[in-house]
Amino acid sequence: MTSEKTNPPLDVLWAPWRMSYIVTCDNPPDCIFCIGDSSESDRERHIICRYRTCFAMLNRFPYNNGHILVAPYRHTADLDSLTDDELLDIVKLLRDCKNALTRCMKPDGFNVGLNLGSAAGAGIQGHLHFHIVPRWRGDTNFMTVTAGTKVIPQSLDETRDLLCQALAGQRE
């Protein structure tokens, strides 16, 4: 009996966006949150919404589909340095992103947080940013437990299009 008859076929997980993370993790690019005023590259950068003092973008290396990062335009690592206007805009944008995710993806819950410093898990320490991660019952399955792999079922471009549309509808 050959192994072809006894072993099930091997499934391949396709996650091409991971390679750019793998090759840059030891040599990170310039600050991804210092985006400037021009919105010309918003699609390529996966920016989904801009407010007066902050913006939201999809995480290129998401924990779950729809993982959003919210950051001030101003480059700062210090929560205490944010102005009241920046804090208010960030909280409003977090709320609006949560509502857009609820309408588009219907998650069962959310993780919302901020990692300050490398000891707290901040991957980009120089520019603070909040995470909002949609969660579904059972979204941790055998893949994460046995293979250390997470399956993201939708492309970043498709997710961006859905969320941009939902966020635009909220502001009208």
Image (tube, grey):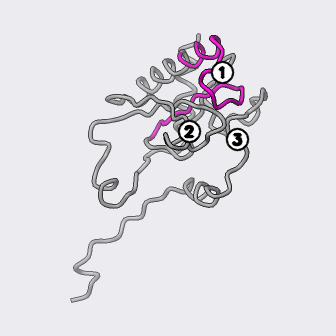
Out of 24 and 76, give the one closest to the viewer: 76
Query: Under tag 2, what secondary structure?
Result: loop
The residue lying toward the viewer, choosing from 116 and 146, is 116
Q: Is residue 15 above or below residue 171?
A: below
- The single residue placed furthest to the bottom in the displayed view is 1
Which element is circle 3 on? loop
At x 31%, y 29%, the residue is 108
Q: Residues within 10 Å of mark 1 (few under 14, many from 20)?
A: few
Q: State which region is magenta.
A: 65-91
Q: CA distance from mark 1 to mark 3?
A: 18 Å
> Quick one: label 2 or label 3, which is nearer the N terminus?
3
Question: Pointers 1 and 2 in contact (CB under 8 A)?
Answer: no
Q: Amino acid at mark 1?
A: Ser
The kind of residue tagged 3 is Cys
Which residue carries the number 3 mark? 31
* Residue named by callout 2: 117
- Quadrant of the image for the N terminus? bottom left
- Residue 86 position within the rendered picture, expressed as x and y whole percent measured from the top left: 64, 16
Question: Mark 1 highlights which residue?
Answer: 81
**Quarter holding residue 80:** top right
